[in-house]
Amino acid sequence: MHLTKITLIRVKGGKSCIISLMPNKNEEEVVRRAALFTALDDASAATLRESMSAVKVAKGQILFKEGDAGDRLFVVVEGKLKLGTSSGDGRENLLSILGPGDMFGELSLFDPGPRTATATAVVDSKLLALAHDQVIGLVKEHPQVALQLLRRLAQRLRKANEVLSDLVFADVPGRVAKAIIELSERFGTQKDDGLHVNHDLTQEELAQLVGASRETVNKALADFATRGWVKLEPRAVIVLDYERLAKRGR
């Protein structure tokens, strides 16, 4: 039996209603991909899912800011969110784009310091939230969950090292090509005319993700289009030659 409960929490920019609802089949499949669930059997996963709360975040709404206290982790069910940081002079850098099945906010579970990034909805999104005290109880009951969470943190550290290496050794076109390939692997849909990548990012956000100016990123994209590797669409890219683009991003 599924019970419905309603709670209010404050999300940056206004109040959001958190409602625990009966999940549909597609939602269950998405949630099961999250690191928090992969170590659990079906019965334990269902129990955990019922204890989580659904959070709806509108496009452009900030879920939490860099420096905020972290008291829960999140799993993306629908939509996209971006994690970014800001420098003292106002410059922004995007760390990652999150989509269905991605989990974030777990770092403060191991390090109770402030949030290290700002989470903002790129499009209207639905998340599942779990308070950290609930996670601690879950880890004590299922130690294998801790291993999955640590594996997730290790993957994040490896990715951070890779990004740092790219900033030092890779040119801007190479970083742009790699970013498109990575976005295509997560958000791409293969159609007759190519691989459609609806990243939903503005030109400025794409440049922040690559770590370059908008002008240099647009120049690289225009070059790829001239070569016939991609077709540019508003907040989307159609990959026409995956192999050459992937090779340029290595």
Image (cartoon, rainbow, N blue to C red):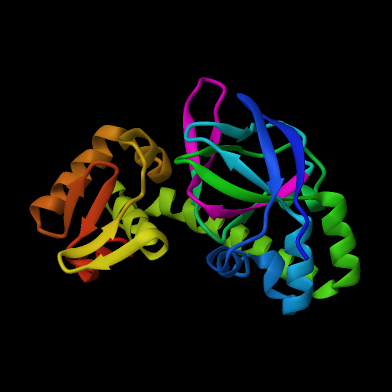
**Rendered view: 144 above or below 63:** below
What residue appears at the point 18 percent right and 56 percent down from the top-left corner?
230
94 displayed left or right of 110 = left
120 drawn magenta: no
Compare residues 158 and 179 and report the one nearer the observer: 179
Q: Observer-nearest residue: 249 or 193?
A: 193
Q: Is residue 70 left or right of residue 90?
A: right
Viewer-side residue, 163 vs 69:
69
Residue plotted at (47% across, 35% down): 59
In this rendering, would 205 be left or right of 153? left
Going by the image, does 42 lie left or right of 165?
Answer: right
The reply to whether residue 3 is visible in this rendering is: yes
Name the residue at 70% across, 69% down: 37
Using the image as rendered, state which of residue 149 and residue 56 is in the foreground: 56
The part of the image, by quadrant, that contains residue 183 is bottom left
Q: Is residue 147 visible?
A: no
Question: How many marks do you count on the picture?
Answer: 0
Tell me residue 7's x, y (percent). Answer: 77, 39
Is 75 magenta? The answer is yes
The quadrant of the rendering that contains the N terminus is bottom right
Which quadrant of the figure contains the C terminus? bottom left
Residue placed furthest toward the bottom: 41
**Residue at (68% x, 53% y) in the render:** 21
In the displayed image of the protein, which residue is found farthest to the front? Answer: 1
Q: Magenta span covers which residues?
A: 72-94
The picture places residue 106, in percent across and down from the top left corner, at 72, 53
Measured from the top left, where is residue 26 in percent x and y?
Answer: 53, 66
Q: What secondary structure predominates along the stretch shown in magenta?
A: strand
Q: Position of residue 35 (x, y in %)?
A: 66, 66
Question: Looking at the image, is 63 positioned above or below residue 153?
Answer: above
Point out the residue furthest to the top here: 89
